[in-house]
Each structure stands twice: as structure tokens, then as C-alpha cells.
Image (tube, rainbow, N blue to C red):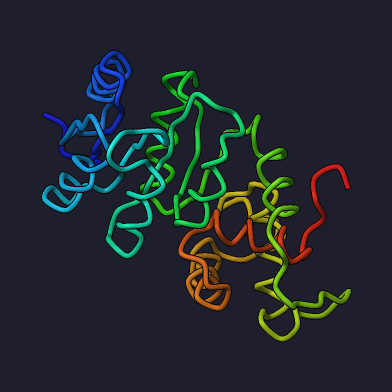
Amino acid sequence: MNTGIRVVIADDQPLVRKGLAALLAAEDGIEVVGVAEDGAEALRMIRQLGPDVACLDIRMPRMNGVEVARAVQHDPVEVLMLTTFDLDEYVFGALEAGAAGFLLKDSDPDVIAHAIREVALGRGLIDQGLTRRVLRAFAVRRAPQPVTVRPGTAADGILTLRELDILRLLAQGMSNSDIAAELHIEASTVKSHLARMLPKLGASSRLQAVVWAYQNRVVALPDQ
């Protein structure tokens, strides 16, 4: 029996629910502890079972995935959103609600398993094919906070220069080890900087920090 990452799955389509549960049950280090058919049941399971990751369909009856993510925003669980829509209106609400990741349901099985492992470690993840469109649309649709970014300085006194370097690399999709190699520091040092940086940005995940960076033009919009 798996005793690794504990996962709750929620989807209103029986075939998707059962297929995803079977897929993850076959993965080493992942344990499916609950399967829900709607958002209200998912919330109950999350609160009762205390999983590490909740895989939530965005569109569900009774409570949608965004409502569940918002309800557990301060609980010790990471939320991975799954949807059939590549630019669903709910994606933006999911990011603001603190979701750690976003994938299409037709992603390869190994991609979904990898995403669960990543978000369980606190690493935000958006499907690579969607990142540009999602972040561009998010940045355009949300009014930026009053932050001025000047070359060679921190973002209006909010971030240190090192934190700003890390945020820019984070926005490029780099892992802690990648960032450490780029900046010639230890991965543990990167982790410490992130722990101090996220509260400054009002972010609860790496993904929210990246969204903040695009909103505030700390990094350029894709293709801009």
C-alpha cells in the first residue's frame, strides 16, 4: 500500500474520477485517500482526511473547484486544478484562490503524476502549453498593484535585489536547484529567500508569486 503523497480527487464525471484514481493508485509514492463526485463532498473529505494534494475539477456541482480552493486556502493542502478548458474563466479565480497548479484533463498520465509531486513540494505548476496565455490574460485583466520597477533596484522597496533575481528566474519556470545553479548559491538558500519573499507579496504559493511578477511588470509579459 502506498504511504507517500496523500491525494483526494474530485470530479463530477465518473469515468474521469475512476480513471484518475486508477492512474494515481499505480504510481509509487502516491496514495489516493478519497474520491469525491462534487465540490461539497471534496471539501468534506479534505477537512476529514487531511490530504497533501487535492486534485479538483474546476466545474463541479454544489461547489466548484475555485470555491473549494478558496475554502481551504489556509489549510495544509495544495490544490491542483484539472479542467477540459484551456482558458476557462475559472482559471483566474483559481489562481487568486491559491491553487498551486493547473492542468488540462487530457494531459499525459506521467504529467499529472509529476504535477502532483511538484505541488506537494510547494512548487507551482501550470501546463506548459497554457502558461503564456494564462499569465498574459491574467496580467491584462487584473489591475497592477502600485509598484515601480527600476533597473538595478528592488521593486519599490518590497523585494531585495536577491529576491528580485529569484522572482525573475521563478517566472521563467526554474526549480530551486535551477535557480541556485544560475545564481551560484545553495538550493537551501533559495528556499529560505522564497519563504521570506512570499509573505511580502501576499502570495501563498510560488505560482501566485509568478502571477504577481507579471501583474506588476517585474518581468515582461510573454512575447512582449
Left or right of 216? Residue 193 is left
Q: Which one is nearer the viewer's eye here, 93 or 164?
A: 93
Question: What is the x, y in percent for residue 223?
Answer: 86, 42
- Residue under the point 22% across and 43% down: 40
User: Count the marks: how many?
Assistant: 0
- Residue under the point 42% across and 19% down: 109
Q: Which one is nearer the viewer's eye here, 120 or 49?
A: 49
- Residue under the point 28% across and 61% down: 75
Give the farthest residue toward the bottom.
157
Q: Quadrant of the N terminus?
A: top left
Left or right of 216? Residue 115 is left
- Residue under the point 31% across and 19% down: 13
Q: Which one is nearer the viewer's eye here, 27 or 139?
A: 139
Question: What is the x, y in percent for residue 69?
Answer: 37, 51
**Which image quadrant is residue 166 in?**
bottom right
Q: Which one is nearer the viewer's eye here, 89 or 105?
A: 89
Position of residue 124 relative to residue 27, above or below, is below
Question: What is the x, y in percent for residue 15?
Answer: 29, 13
Give the farthest residue toward the front.
62
Question: What is the x, y in percent for residue 64?
Answer: 36, 41
**Which image quadrant is residue 148 in?**
bottom right
Left or right of 17? Residue 166 is right
